[in-house]
Image: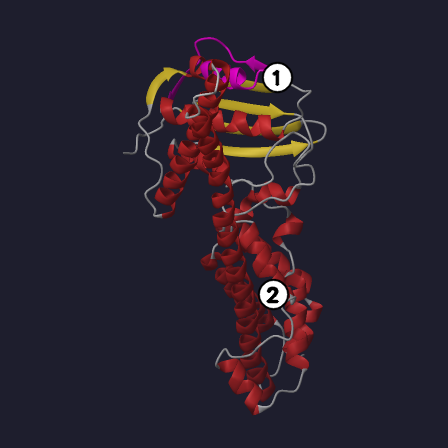
Amino acid sequence: MRLSQFIEQNVETIVTEWETFARETMEPAQTMSRLALRDHAAQILLAIAKDLRQPQTEDERHIKSQGLAKSDSSETSAATHGVLRQLVGFDLVQLTAEYRAVRATVLRLWKQAPKVIDANVVEDVARFNEAVDQALAESIASYSERVAHSRDTFLAVLGHDLRSPLSAITSALVLLGDSRSQGQQRDRALQIAKRSAASMRQMIIDLLEYTRTRLGRGIEIVAEAGDFSGLCRDVVEEVAAAHSDRAFVVQIPKDLEAQFDAARMRQVLTNLLSNAVQYGDPASPIVVTATREIAETTLAVMNRGKSISPDALQVIFDPLVQIPTTDSDRNGRPETSLGLGLYIVREIVTAHGGSISVSSSDADGTVFTLHLPDSTKSTV
């Protein structure tokens, strides 16, 4: 049996073994659905099998061996696979490991199949390795293009988001400098300037912390035992005061103690509540709950509204992925956003030794749930 025929007849077995490897060794894969994790794997294998059946000249072999082969289309299964892996948070090392696992799985399974070792076997193995390398090159190319596009989008959104509050501050200063403006006008202009400056300040803080995490330094925390319920109630009151048209329901027991960095945890809850305000149904309350379990504290923030798609849930904590929406105007939320808030939330929770997850459905709403262990260690 030639290798191309073996691949075609054993695609499901090969993909199943690869799926097990990915889920056990790659962090992004651990939360992916079976369908998302397997995306295009079978198609890539079948494309490789088809390539093995095609005659190949010496010139074509040389081009492939030098990594110079060009695909006729950017829409190959391998190229699409690279884009999707970037979207769900795989890095290039993990993407390469996938192909290494596929290569090893195919050759190991084929080795177990009865065959006569002849020139055809040697030819098949050589061409199989060339085809896998070509598929990997297509995935990496599309992955890199997607990263560049995301980076450009990120910079464009940054410029947009900074321009809006800057324009508001400029207009407010013009009004404040006009001697004809009245007291009420001046007060309103001052409030606009303060609010816009605070917005710009928060964006800059988020950018600095994003840069810190990308450089490998992580979020610094100083965790101490404290009144977690009191902190939560204070933050809810602050956010509710800024959004008097929204309802908040707090279900937190009194005197709930936890080990946490107060300033950082205030930032976490503020970001989660602000996210719920932006994306939630204005007619439904935002519900904040906290419970004490064995050796950990659990906090959940829930809002009703349009559920988040499974694909978007996979990337919701990624800072450089813009999640498309079809109702960006419905709740008055901006159509563009840096998307750093939830990323920083995850980094802060991780620095506490905890974890955060999100679920979303029309029946249960969108719920962000974080778990904080008692054994949090400070990182400075």
User: What residue did someone put label 2 on?
Assistant: 78
Q: Quadrant of the C terminus?
A: top left
Q: Which label is found at residue 245?
A: 1
- Taking the image as shown, residue 82 lies to the left or right of residue 226, namely right
Characterize the local packing of mark 2: few (<14), some (14-19) or many (20 or more) Cα atoms within 10 angstroms: many
Location of residue 119 in the rendering, given as x and y in whole percent from the top left corner: 57, 88
Q: Secondary structure at mark 1?
A: loop
Residue placed furthest toward the left: 380
Q: Which label is found at residue 263?
A: none
What's the residue at 63%, 57% (across, down)? Answer: 16
Check the image and report above or below for 297 versus 131.
Answer: above
Q: Secondary structure at mark 2?
A: helix
> Magenta residues?
234-259
User: Would residue 256 be visible to someone looking at this image?
Assistant: yes
Q: Nearer the viewer, residue 181 or 234?
A: 181
Amino acid on which the number 2 mark rests in the picture: Ala
